[in-house]
Image (spheres, grey):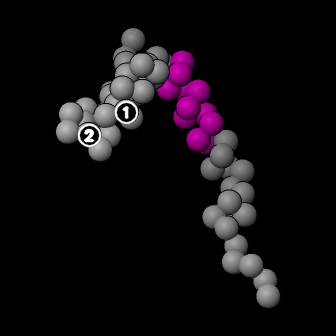
Amino acid sequence: MKPEPSIFDEVDIDADKAADAEGVADLDAGRVIQHDAMKAWLLSLGTADELLPPQPATS
């Protein structure tokens, strides 16, 4: 019996390159979320004091 294919079985090289280029452009432009802000948000999920998702800094 052949196993079901995973979503990770198909590789779209062009889509991967485009996603990498978009990420690098965001980094170059300073559109990043600080680690401490992301950590605080993640730790707040599911609590009574849940925070709003952090927004990327713009430089």
Q: Position of residue 49 (x, y in %)?
A: 21, 33
Kindly give the residue lying farthest to the bottom in the view shown: 1
Question: Viewed as shown, does residue 51 lie left or right of 17?
Answer: left
- SS at badge 1: helix
Task: Give the quadrant of residue 36.
Answer: top left
Note whether 15 is above or below 48 in the view shown.
Answer: below
For label 2, the residue is: 47
From the image, give the main secondary structure of the stretch colored magenta: helix
Q: Is residue 4 on the magenta stretch?
A: no
* Mark 1 → mark 2, Cα distance in angstroms: 8 Å
Can you say which quadrant of the picture contains the C terminus? top left
Task: Pick the residue in front: 23 or 6.
Answer: 6
Kindly give the residue lying farthest to the right in the view shown: 1
Q: Are marks 1 and 2 in contact (CB under 8 Å)?
A: yes
Task: Pick the residue in front: 29 or 52.
Answer: 52
Task: Pick the residue in front: 15 or 43.
Answer: 43
Question: Few, some or many C-alpha atoms within 10 Å of disc 2 (few <14, some 14-19, many ≥20)?
Answer: few
Question: Which residue shows up at 61% across the image and 42% down it?
Answer: 18
Residue type (three-letter) at the residue carrying disc 1 = Leu
> Does residue 45 appear in the picture of this structure?
yes
Question: Which residue shows up at 59% across the image and 27% down it?
Answer: 24
Note whether 21 is above or below 12 in the view shown.
Answer: above
**Disc number at residue 43?**
1
Q: Position of residue 1 (x, y in %)?
A: 79, 88
Q: Magenta part of the protein: which range?
A: 18-28
Question: Which residue shows up at 67% across the image and 42% down it?
Answer: 17
